Every structure is written in structure tokens, then in C-alpha cells.
């Protein structure tokens, strides 16, 4: 019997349980990347953003890409993960390799809701876009992360991104833009004491 997703779990546990639930997954990928004050935090107003649009067009490349066999990944522990530099974190990638050779995605979304939008409203949006699907919402420190406990084809993944982007008030277009360039979504598994001090943790479970 597979372990259930539960409140209080951290993001590494969530991704491991999702991988366990889908035996067709052969390999998964983690990336290490730098964290800092981002472009949207530095430049609050529209005119400021336009004045620094060159910085807003920068697409960073992961410092480390590491593929794991499913069993190897599912046995990882936060204390035994590979060491990385200061101001670096490990993130999980949505795109997975399957035994049949067809790439699929774990549904993942990084919420940056507009001011005044509550957690309950985000949950309603998730249930509307992913009806009757298992998944979890995590608190990331500033905002929220979502993982679905199901798999998407490449075409379904594009429609998934589109569905969360279209309401305009749930996610950052920059997050979706980076995902489209990369060909996958990524969400943080670890913390950085300076810029990302909170390890994402489950606050809501969808059945």
C-alpha cells in the first residue's frame, strides 16, 4: 500500500510519495540553482520594471543537473542530499522519464497570488483546474506550491500551465515563462538561510 500525502510533510517527502505512487516513472531530476532577491521583489512598480527590462529577460541556468533512479531518489533524506554552496537550493523538476520512453510531467505550480487573494481561494482554483485529482498545497514561506499526484503528457502539461496563467491573479507570468523555456516546472525542496529560509510544508491535501 502506498503512503498517503498528509499535512505537515515537507516537499522532499511529497515528491518521493508521488514517485512511489507511479511505478511507470523510471528517473527523476533535481537541479541546484542560486536564490536571491528576485526581479519582481527589486522592482515593485511597472515603470521600475520597464526601466530594468534587460534584467527581467535573464534566464538563469541551473548550476547542477542530477538524474536519479526512482529507488535512489525515494531513499534520499534531507541530511544526506548532496552538499551545495551557500545561496543555492535543490529543486525538483516536473519532467520525468518513464519506462515506456514517453516523457511525462508531475503537475507543479508556484503561486504568486495578487494581494487580497487568500489560501482558500487558491484551493478553489486548484479544485476547479484539477477536479477530483489528488494533490497537495504547500506553504513556501512567501507564497504557495502545488503538487498533483498524477501525471501529464507534454500536451496536457502545456494546458495545465495555461489554465493557471489565464486567470491572471494566481501565478507569476515569469514562472510560466521560465517553465516554457526550460521545458519543465521546478519547485524548491530545500532552504537557504538568507533568501529562502523556509522548507515548503503541506498545509492542504486534495483527494
Image (cartoon, rainbow, N blue to C red):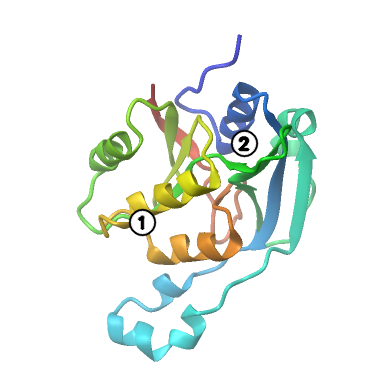
- Identify the mark at residue 12; answer none if there is no mark: 2
Q: Nearer the viewer, mark 2 or mark 1?
A: 1
Q: Which residue is mark 1?
A: 171
For residue 104, side relative to residue 39 (left or right): right
What x and y, as percent, mark residue 38?
A: 48, 70
Where is 25 relative to 181, above or below?
A: above
Around disc 2, counting alpha carbons within 10 Å, would you say few (fewer than 14), some (14 to 19), or many (20 or more)? Answer: many
Residue situated furthest top in the rendering = 1
Q: Nearer the viewer, residue 120 or 198?
A: 120
Q: Give the Cα distance between marks 2 and 1.
A: 22 Å
- Identify the mark at residue 163; answer none if there is no mark: none
Q: Secondary structure at mark 1?
A: loop
For residue 65, side relative to residue 140 (left or right): right
- Quadrant in the rendering for residue 80: top right
Q: Residue at x 51, y 30 (%)?
A: 150
Where is 148 relative to 170, above or below?
A: above
Query: From the image, which quarter does the N terminus lie in?
Result: top right
For residue 63, side relative to residue 158 (left or right): right
Q: Residue at x 57, y 49 (%)?
A: 188
What x and y, as percent, mark residue 83?
A: 79, 50
Q: Residue at x 60, y 14 (%)?
A: 2
Instruction: Evaluate if marks 2 and 1 touch, with contact meaning CB atoms under 8 Å apart.
Output: no
- Nearer the N terminus, badge 2 or badge 1? 2
Residue situated furthest left in the rendering = 116
Q: How many discs appear?
A: 2
For residue 64, side relative to residue 193 (left or right): right
Where is 12 relative to 53, above or below?
A: above
Q: Is residue 32 visible?
A: yes
Q: Residue at x 77, y 46 (%)?
A: 67
What x and y, as percent, mark residue 166?
A: 29, 57
Q: Secondary structure at mark 2?
A: helix
Amino acid at each position: 500500500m502506498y503512503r498517503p500525502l498528509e499535512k505537515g510533510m515537507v516537499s522532499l517527502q511529497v515528491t518521493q510519495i508521488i514517485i512511489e505512487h507511479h511505478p511507470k516513472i523510471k528517473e527523476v531530476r533535481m537541479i541546484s540553482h542560486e536564490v536571491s532577491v528576485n526581479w519582481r521583489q527589486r522592482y515593485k512598480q511597472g515603470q521600475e520594471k520597464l526601466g530594468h527590462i534587460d534584467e527581467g529577460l535573464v534566464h538563469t541556468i541551473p548550476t547542477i543537473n542530477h538524474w536519479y533512479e526512482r529507488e535512489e531518489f525515494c531513499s534520499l533524506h534531507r541530511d544526506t542530499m548532496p552538499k551545495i554552496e551557500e545561496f543555492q537550493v535543490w529543486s525538483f523538476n516536473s519532467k520525468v522519464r518513464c519506462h515506456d520512453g514517453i516523457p511525462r510531467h508531475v503537475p507543479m505550480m508556484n503561486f504568486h497570488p495578487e494581494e487580497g487573494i487568500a489560501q482558500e481561494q487558491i484551493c478553489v482554483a486548484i479544485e476547479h483546474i484539477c477536479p477530483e485529482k489528488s494533490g497537495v498545497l504547500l506553504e513556501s514561506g512567501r507564497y504557495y506550491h502545488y503538487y498533483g499526484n498524477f501525471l501529464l503528457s507534454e500536451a496536457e502539461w502545456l494546458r495545465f500551465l495555461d489554465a493557471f496563467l489565464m486567470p491572471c491573479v494566481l501565478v507569476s507570468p515569469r514562472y510560466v515563462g521560465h517553465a516554457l523555456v526550460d521545458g519543465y516546472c521546478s519547485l524548491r525542496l530545500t532552504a537557504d538561510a538568507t533568501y529562502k529560509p523556509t522548507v515548503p510544508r503541506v498545509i492542504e491535501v486534495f483527494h
